[in-house]
Image (spheres, helix red, strand yellow):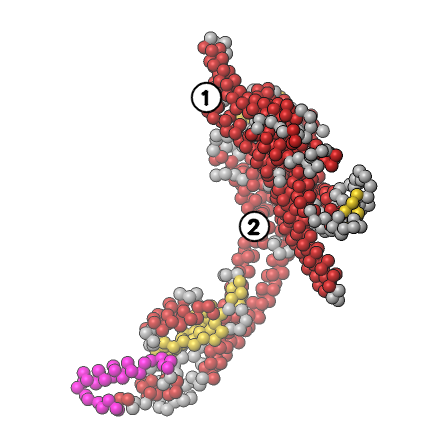
Amino acid sequence: MSFYFRSEEMQLVQLLIKQETAYPLIKSLGQLSAIQFLDLNAGKPNILRDYHNDVKKFDKLERTVRKFEAVTIGLPEPPKDANYLLQSEDNDNIENGSIDAIEEEILENSIKLNDLVENEQNLKRRWFELIEFQHNLETVKKYLKDKAFNQDKNSNSSSSSGSGSDSTSSELNANKLNSDEDLIELDEFKKDKTNNDKEQSTKIDQKKIEAIDSTNIYDQYLKFSIVTGTISTESRGRVEKLLWRGTKGNAYVSFWDITDPIYNPVKKQNEFRTVFVVYYSGDFLRNRITKIVESFNAKVFNVASTDEERKEQLDDVKTQLSDLKTTLSQTKVFMNKFQKFLQVRIIPWYRRILIEKATYHTLNMLSKDSNKQYLVAKGWVRLSKLESFREVINGDEDEFGENGTILNTLDNEEGLIEPTYIDCKEYQESTQKLVSSFFIPKYREINPAPIMLVTFPFLFSVMFSDLGHGILLTLFALFLFKTYDAYKVSHLHSLIQMFYDARHLILTMGISSCFIGIMYNEFFAAPMHLFNSCWEPDKNSTLSYNLRYEHCTYPFGVDPEWANKSNWLIFFNSFKMKNAVVFGFFQVTLGMIIALINCIYKKKYLEIFFDVIPRIIVLFASTGYMCFLIIYKWGIDWSTRKGQEGGIKIITTLIDLAFGFGKVDDDSAFFYNQESLQKTLVAFIFIGIIVLWFALPIIKFFQMRRKNKLYTLGEIEYEDFEKFKSKYTGFTDLFVNQSIIAMEFALGILSNTASYTRLWALSLSHSELSAIFWDKLIMYPLSTNVPGFLVITFFFWVGFTLFVLMMSEGLSAFLHTLRLHWIEFFSKFVDDENGIEFRPFSFKLSFQNNSEFEDEI
């Protein structure tokens, strides 16, 4: 049981290992998971450590295996233990074979994978280009035929035609040239023609120039060529504008969108492409047009000038596509087989690499003795594992050498911080993670996680106080238990995994909510008549109730007839608020008790008598007395006390305690001799604050003076004096620090009491929301007698219950419960110093999180 509430005891050990046996010994210790090695080369750069190159080699192999893992994404998941898919001989070679052979095999498969990937990318890139070329040929062929750009049509006069593999000369009809999209502006041509005539001193009538037939102008001066290709559909508008500006209007471009998207292997996504054809005249424009379209990642194709040649090109492209499709299909099949081959070897390879990497990383933490014959190792070993550790060290002489390894147990004379190891059971994991998120308990201190197994669900249920909602939460927890086995072999989202990990905590939260729901007598906000009520309606008044018999008491929880009284909200407010304060006091007291036990174990007697005990006295004299009055008031039948039939307000008594120094009027006294008790409590509060404020600084100041005197007389050594002096910061610093602690504690008594009232506030809000949904969506439709209305509102009620009350309110109650533990509870025994988690050298931990073994360069 001591391991349950405290961390396990540790033993500091030293190992002297022969260099030739260091590797197999460290590897055996990694399987034992018993020792946490200390880095004896902490100030030494990694590059200067003996096994730095080995760690880097396995880093490279690990990255290679991760690359294998990346290319197998999308394949069906292999069984969790993929080793059985290998032949037994192959498996033995990976698990126990030579690491050099494994390295060679991994690198060979890496080269093979790179070749396959590169070949597949080249084939896909070629397929992409051919598909675009095919669309380009089909579009240009169709356009030239439909628009009659052939040289034997629409010719009014003889014209010469140039031919080439990437251009075509043609004549335009008059209607096309006279449109708003002329390729050559006729006005500029007329102007140039007029100027030339003037230079030759030949006067031509302006009307004759205007009457020049446009087809004759193109026949004499222009030979049109084209640049064609494909471009991204998104870029067509910018290309058109830039071509117009870049050619000063001397080019005309047409676009035809390709209907289906085409997979782009460079961008690794589907892309919509557009075929473009640019018409121009003059070879000097071709380079400019080509540069413009290529700046938008366009692909320019060489299209033949005649229909026959284009048809031959199209047939050739289709043939190449057919052959390429077959090649791609075969490549995909071969790639899939190779991926499956890699997939079943990734886990064994990965395990072996991590084992080797962790082993050499640990060897880098060892130092050499003065004679450089032994490697020296130090570390912490769990006391329960010490015998097993000895057996491994002194085990097989054939494996570790004739002289074996020397094991020495050491005392912690250097003041090293002992690591904390907590034997965490499965049902404790959820609360232990909540504790570890806030702090790590120091060595041999009380671990609050087992206590939270009770306090966390209980405080949650006080805020989530409804039997119906508690049943739903319990059923959800049972569902998590039922499906847990299926969850373990599947990969789920981290949020879903969090619910499965907390299934034990959720179950206890649901059961506690059911208990508090019965105590508050709420089932989806409706009162439950589990027992006979002690109240019955008055026959003479519809608003009054009478006791069924004298001194009647409802067996358990709140009497259901309270829900029918006009003052039920006032009653529940007072009842839940006082409950919250009492629960908070008990939890804060528990935190103070933990602080006291920790100090007793560490033998910190000054802190016990001048810090912890004064805190407990002040807490009990203030908040404890208030809780005592609350419980005492509940047990009094005020109808039997003359002059006090309505009861005494506790707030009045507390105000008199604080500002009247304990003075009590006879009419407001709860019990006999109350004033004497309250004056005693005020004295205890005053003395406790004074002791907490001044005692420790004064005592430590005189301790320092005494140490100085003993050191001057030579009665203590220099090392002991310096060690003590390093912890002393001067009287002023001690006093200021202790003043802050005392004031924080005094104010914390008030703030803690106010903070725990959230138990009342959230419980009341949860109850009110539930009551509103029940009255408006269930009870009101029943009173209307409208057919089908209840069916509709019932589904709304289910939705609001699940999403608002269960999820939203449940999450709010969980976070507030977590806050009460982290701040109000933990602050009573957690100081600024944090413990160190025990992380042994373990291959199992390396498989879970290998980032800690990364080589820092």
Could you tell me which residue is drawn at 46 percent across and 71 percent down?
Answer: 230
Q: Nearer the viewer, mark 1 or mark 2?
A: 1
Q: Which amino acid is tagged 2?
A: Lys
Residue 478: image x %, image y %? 74, 47
Among the 4 quarters of the image, the one containing residue 572: top right
Mark 1, other Cα within 10 Å: few <14 / some 14–19 / many ≥20? few
Magenta part of the protein: which range? 180-208
Q: Which mark is residue 451?
A: none
- Cα–Cα span, label 1 and label 2: 59 Å
Left or right of 832 on screen, residue 240: left
Q: Is residue 471 visible?
A: no
Disc 1 secondary structure class: loop
Question: Quick check: marks 1 and 2 in contact, CB under 8 Å?
Answer: no
- For disc 2, the marked residue is 67
- The correct choice, above or below, for 220 with respect to 853 in the image is below
Q: Nearer the viewer, residue 817 or 490?
A: 817
Quarter holding the N terminus is top right
Q: Which amino acid is tagged 1?
A: Gly
Could you tell me which residue is drawn at 32 percent across and 74 percent down?
Answer: 248
Q: Nearer the viewer, residue 525 or 211?
A: 525
- For disc 1, the marked residue is 730
- The correct choice, above or below, for 109 with respect to 380 in the image is below
Residue 427 on the magenta span: no
The residue sitting at the left extreme is 201
Q: Nearer the viewer, residue 166 or 784?
A: 784
Mark 2, other Cα within 10 Å: few <14 / some 14–19 / many ≥20? few
